[in-house]
Image (spheres, rainbow, N blue to C red):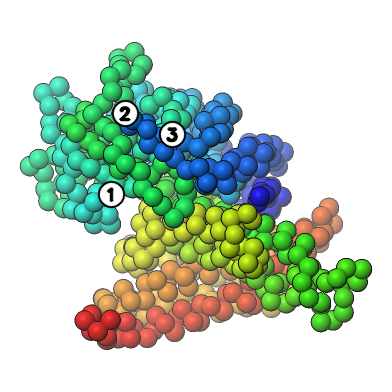
Amino acid sequence: MPHYRAPVDDTQFVLHDVLRIADSGVPGYEDLDRDTTRAVLEEAGKLAGDVLAPLNSMGDAEGCRLENGVVRTPEGFKAAYDMMREGGWIGLDCDPEYGGQGMPHLLNSAVGEYFVSANMAFNMYQGLSHGAYNAIHTHGSAAQKETYLPKLVEGSWSGTMNLTEPQCGTDLGLIRTKAEPQEDGTYRITGQKIWISAGEHDLTDNIIHLVLARIPGGPDGVKGISLFIVPKFLVEEDGTTGARNAVSCGGLEEKMGIHGNATCVMNYDGATGFLIGEAHKGMRAMFTMMNEARLGVGVQGYAQGSVAYQNALAFARDRLQGRDLTGPQNASGPADPIIVHPDVRRNLLDQKSFVEGARAFALWGAFLIDRAARAEDAEAEALVSLLTPVLKGFLTDKGFETTVFAQQTLGGSGFTREWGLEQFVRDARITMIYEGTNGVQSLDLVGRKLGHAGGKTIMGFLDLVRGFMASHQDDAALKEEFLDPLDQATADLSTACTYFMQNGIREPMNALAGSYDFMHLFGHVCLGYMWAQMAKAAQDALANGSSDAVFHETKLSTGRYYMSRQLPATAMHLARIESGAEPVMSLDAANF
């Protein structure tokens, strides 16, 4: 059975030595000293390792089942959910006015990684609730907030988001679900939604569905979509649950992975719904959920890579196969552990360098969200909006790749269920698909985000990276091993931006054909920037008499690997971008 140990020291290093959160000036961060964050992280790690991780393979094997309209979650999930709820983890970063703990989003993201690594399918139940909470908190009326938020925060109720229908996914303008106005101000919701995560289950007393639908007579396309609260059980004036609403689970999807999470077909048969915000403005409210969800999915991507790497590393240390070419390392045994072999080392370092760089990138993204919200920093808001498709797309593509690399480390054992690596591969695969496929993320990045504010935001990012490099040019070791590779990669990113500016408007297909490579080029630069900052922090720690020199030396060695073996991929992506649309579009569709 696979194991999991929360990487508390790594998280602490990013929070305090790289991001320096206590000195950041973000309101609420002044309380996040090292002892406080370690206490929270260690408790989350215990829950993840001792409770959630042992349920992961069992939940995968058992899956969910639909019985008389009720979805039964795998054995042990209800007890684990109750522990999560009673511990206050569901409302960790929620508004204290509604029972939350009011902690920064950054800390919620950090512990979220641990819960995802331990049991991704389980964590999705509370993850969707958090998105519903945010949408209602941001766009709901005072009465809606009072009715729904306290129960969502405490976890006795859960939430969902209902977008996709059988005939439409990415193109939400094709939605057919109807919302007919009633004399009492409510709406009758009729239609079918598919692929609804946690749409029906037995973990909570009520499920609050957020549903996109059309009010008759509204504009066509996305401009005519509204957002509605449709509870499984209607809520009485005193806050208790009342009659069952006309919403039901029509079936469960048979999926490649995340078997422990119920992915439902939801039928709305004249269900009572309550409008959130303005009529025909539902997309704005829904994207409050979508943007958070996309950042959360980015965390899912590298978190699955993280747990897969941990198990691959343990196997590589124990598995005896062959001899080190430089001489036996296990002279008393029949063979050496496979970690002595260069190709296994390469594989493991590909995994390790990505996971640790991705963790820093994701936590930086969460930091920017807090800075935008808590410090009302417009530049931080613009930057995290630019980075969101990169966080989602790059971290899930590479996260899935990392689980495959980890599986490969185990050889034939990785292909069997006994060792658990094949589950990490299957579970990670969905992250590249849901909350907007990664192809859509790349189109959003190039088609919308890159040119926002006349390119001011991407130029601001480039200036940020260049400013860091300029401020440390006198550090010879940092310059040669980290800054020079980062400088070249940043130049590749800048050249790609110039290419799109010069060719994208005149020949839009050039931009579209290069968008996926641009997302990956951008992602590598972001991880290179993270590694350069981590290297500087590790150097400083060693210069100041580090109490854990091995930890900081390991950071430097891992960072050097990324800069020399992974970051040069930016040149390849740039070459693909500059080849334009012709190689992609020259083959007639009929000839594929």
Position in image of residue 192 (x %, y %): 23, 42
Name the residue beneath numbered marker 3: 72
Callout 2 amino acid:
Lys
Callout 3 amino acid:
Arg
Q: Nearer the viewer, residue 499 or 198?
A: 198
Left/right placement of residue 239 relative to residue 180 reads right
What number is the disc on residue 164? 1
Q: What residue do we see at 44% from left, 84% from top?
A: 575
Q: Nearer the viewer, mark 3 or mark 2?
A: 3
Left/right placement of residue 36 relative to residue 461 reads right
Q: Nearer the viewer, residue 262 or 387?
A: 262
Label 3 close to label 2 by CB (< 8 Å): no
Q: What residue do we see at 23% from left, 54% from top?
A: 168
Position in image of residue 135 (x %, y %): 35, 38
Callout 1 amino acid:
Thr
Above or below residue 545? Residue 565 is: below
At label 3, counting other C-alpha atoms closer than 10 Å, the crowd grade (few under 14, some 14-19, many 20 or more) is some
First reached walking from the N terminus: tag 1 or tag 3: 3
Name the residue beneath numbered marker 2: 232
Quadrant in which residue 418 is drawn:
bottom right
Q: What residue do we see at 73% from left, 58% from top?
A: 314
Residue 591 appears in the picture as rendered: yes
- What separation in Å lies between label 1 and label 3 (alpha carbons)? 23 Å
